[in-house]
Structures are given as C-alpha cells and as structure tokens.
C-alpha cells in the first residue's frame, strides 16, 4: 500500500486518527481489493487501514461512521468478493492478535483468540495442545474473527459448537460488547453478523471451549470413509487434522495458486416433502436429516448432475473435484464471476427446482 492523499482526504484522516492512539495508524487511498481477496477480483477501496488493537479498531469504525462513509472489517479475504466499482468507504484490516488460555480444567480449556489470528494456525496450536473441537476445521483459510460471521464449519464441526462468547465493537452503541453464543443467531453458514446485524459489529476476539477427550466416531461421512480406507482406528485431534488436510488437499484448490473462495455455494436445505418428490426421479440423491423436517442436500452433487462439472464460463471454472468451488482462471471482472454464478444457479434450478445460494459475502 502507498500513501496518496488529496486535501479532503487529509482532513478525514486527521479526524479518523483521533486522540486515543499510542501507535500511529497509516491510512491509504484507492487500494486494489483484488490484492486482498483470494478470488483476485474487485475494484479499489476508497480508504484502507490496519487495526492492531480493539481501540484502533473502534476508533477507525467510529470515525468512518462520523464521516458518513461505510466501513468493512476484512480478515483473510477468503470468503469475500468485491464488485468492479470497489468499496466506497473504509476497509479495516483486522490485525488484532492474541492466544490465551483463560480457563483450564481437567476436562476442557477455554481459549481467547484475537480476531486477526490466522484460523488454521489457531487450529494447529489447539491440536498441539491435544484439544478437540475444531480439528475438523483444519485448512480453512481466513481469520479467527471471521469464523463466527458465517458460522464456519467443515466435516461435522462448526464454530457454533465451541464458541462461548465473542468481543466486538458495536458501531450502533459506540461501545465494546460481549456477545454470548446464543446472541449470535447461529444457523447453517450464517449468523446475525451476515443477516440482521450486517455491518454493525467489528469482532476482535473469540473465546472457544475445547475438550481434552479424544474425538469419537462415527465421523462425518467423507472423513469416516478416509479412516476406513487407510485403516485408522485410534483417533486423536492430530489424526483428525492430518486426515482433513489430506482430504482438502485432494478436493480443494489452494487459493494462492488458483484463485477461489473455497465453497462458493452453500449446501441446499430442503423440506422432507421436496426430498420425497425429488427422489422419485433421483432415488440416489444424498441427503442428511437436520431435524424439523429439513434435509441438507450436497450442492456439489446437484451441480454435477446438472452437467456443470469442469465447465468454464467467462473465465471461471467449476472445479472438477468439488463442484462447490469456482476457480478464477482468466476472469477479469465481477461481471465474469456473476455470469458463472448465475449459470450454475440456473442449471440447478431448472433441473431440481432448488435455488442454491452463494456463500461468500459481498462488500
């Protein structure tokens, strides 16, 4: 990033800086978002800064609001996409660090983690401590603070299972708040942070309750098949982590090598009557009972059945090993991505009468 300000920007920057800092904060103008997003698309952010503490985070967000410009808290950029027109406000890069054991008992430990910590590095540290609860979420790119936003999960675990509480700056109340698990409104790949409270909270720490007991089978189907194939019968957090990393390496492209956002589409949630009707035509349709007459259908299976596997649309490839993933091979714009997205959505809807949904947030 480089520093180029006009006179108006300088006034804004001085007001953004305020008087509360013990560290000078750099604010930058017209920064290409594609350099910070793993899909490698998007226009420029009007302003960008880094926040290394809760006070810096709050002051940046507060001042942006005072200037009547929006703010967006960005972690690893692995589950966010930006449009070609960019972002008209202040992008705050979450750099708040921390990894502290705040409670330790014979059966569990509670760990407070800074929102700017790399998620997979957090998982690795907990596995080294022989703690269980997030080991199946190994290899997921992004930051710890972003995990509650979409209730990140994989292979049978999700953040809602272990999160006790989180700390955030509430831009509406202009105060620091602590939200308990039940206040986060967790559901499948969602929470209040991407629904009713979008843009309100800037999360700077999460507290997870992790267990000292060994992971127990039966595991998520794909994970259990892997264990059966390799003959693993003794399970530890490290055994599960190693298996998940092996599966992900085979099924998911590295965003540093092939730009993507991981799973671009959520798995479909349908009601029992819909599943019954669909299985009259597709008796082998996989589905997982979620209770309350709802079933989860793997969207990757739907996309493959719709004939979209490995197709390239406007420079975006539907991954041949996991149809949930869109890979940017030569796309130059958000419009290219949107064309591929709509083609996939239309194909699934036309065949199955199911409307699948995008998973990444849009700035």
Image: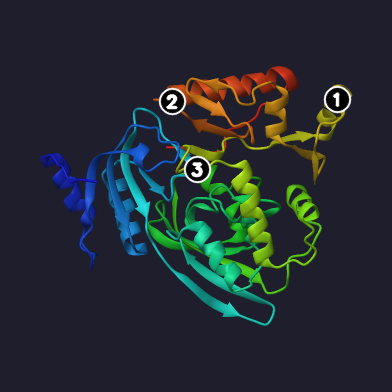
Q: Residues within 10 Å of mark 2 (few under 14, many from 20)?
A: some
Percent position of residue 245, x then y:
61, 53
Q: Nearer the viewer, residue 99 or 206?
A: 99
Residue at 37% from the left image edge and 58% from the top image edge: 95
Q: Which residue in the structure is indicated by mark 1? A: 277
Q: Taking 155 as reference, is 318 above or below it?
A: above
Image mark for residue 79: 3
Q: Residues within 10 Å of mark 1 (few under 14, many from 20)?
A: few
| Name of the residue lying farthest toward the bottom | 106
Disc 2/disc 1 C-alpha distance (Å): 38 Å
**Local SS, label 1:** helix
Disc 3/disc 1 C-alpha distance (Å): 33 Å
Q: Earlier in the sequence, mark 3 or mark 1?
A: 3
Left or right: where 175 falls relative to 316: left
Left or right: where 131 falls relative to 193: right
Q: Nearer the viewer, residue 286 or 277?
A: 286
Task: Check contact, mark 3 vs mark 2: CB within 8 A.
Answer: no
Left or right: where 116 falls relative to 270: left
Q: Which residue in the structure is indicated by mark 2? A: 331
Residue at 40% from the left image edge and 32% from the top image edge: 41
| Name of the residue lying farthest toward the top | 350
Disc 3/disc 2 C-alpha distance (Å): 18 Å
Residue at 69% from the left image edge and 27% from the top image edge: 304
Question: Is any atom of residue 95 visible in this view?
Answer: yes
| Name of the residue lying farthest toward the left | 7
**Local SS, label 3:** loop
Q: Quadrant of residue 293?
A: top right
Percent position of residue 159, x then y:
61, 56
Q: Residues within 10 Å of mark 3 (few under 14, many from 20)?
A: many
Percent position of residue 36, x then y:
37, 43
Q: Earlier in the sequence, mark 3 or mark 2?
A: 3
Question: Is any atom of residue 179 visible in this view?
Answer: no
């Amino acid at each position: 990033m480089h520093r180029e300000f006009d006179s108006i920007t300088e006034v804004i920057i001085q007001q953004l800086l305020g008087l509360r800092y013990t560290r000078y904060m750099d604010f930058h103008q017209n920064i290409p978002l594609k350099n910070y997003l793993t899909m490698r698309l998007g226009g420029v952010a009007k302003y960008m800064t880094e926040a290394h503490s809760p006070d810096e985070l709050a002051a940046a967000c507060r001042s942006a609001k005072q200037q009547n410009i929006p703010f967006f808290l960005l972690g690893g950029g692995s589950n966010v996409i930006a449009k070609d027109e960019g972002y008209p406000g202040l992008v705050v890069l979450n750099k708040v660090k921390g990894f502290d054991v705040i409670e330790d008992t014979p059966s569990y430990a509670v760990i407070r983690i800074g929102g700017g910590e790399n998620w997979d590095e957090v998982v690795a540290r907990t596995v080294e401590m022989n703690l269980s609860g997030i080991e199946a979420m190994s290899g997921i790119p992004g930051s710890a603070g972003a995990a509650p936003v979409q209730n990140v999960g994989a292979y049978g675990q999700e953040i809602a299972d272990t999160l006790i509480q989180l700390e955030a700056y509430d831009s509406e109340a202009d105060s620091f708040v602590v939200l308990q698990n039940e206040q986060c409104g967790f559901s499948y790949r969602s929470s209040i942070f991407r629904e009713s409270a979008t843009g309100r909270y800037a999360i700077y720490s999460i507290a997870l309750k992790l267990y000292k007991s060994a992971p127990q089978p039966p595991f998520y189907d794909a994970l259990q098949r892997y264990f059966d194939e390799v003959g693993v019968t003794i399970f530890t957090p490290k055994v599960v982590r190693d298996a998940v990393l092996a599966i992900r390496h085979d099924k998911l492209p590295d965003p540093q090598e092939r730009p993507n956002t991981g799973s671009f589409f959520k798995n479909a949630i349908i009601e029992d009557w819909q599943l019954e009707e669909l299985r009259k035509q597709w008796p082998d349709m996989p589905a997982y009972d979620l209770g309350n007459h709802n079933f989860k259908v793997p969207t990757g299976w739907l996309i493959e059945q719709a004939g979209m596997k490995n197709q390239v649309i406007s420079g975006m490839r539907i991954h041949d090993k996991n149809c949930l993933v869109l890979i940017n091979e030569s796309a130059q714009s958000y419009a290219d991505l949107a064309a591929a997205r709509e083609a996939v959505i239309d194909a699934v809807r036309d065949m199955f009468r199911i409307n699948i949904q995008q998973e990444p947030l849009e700035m």
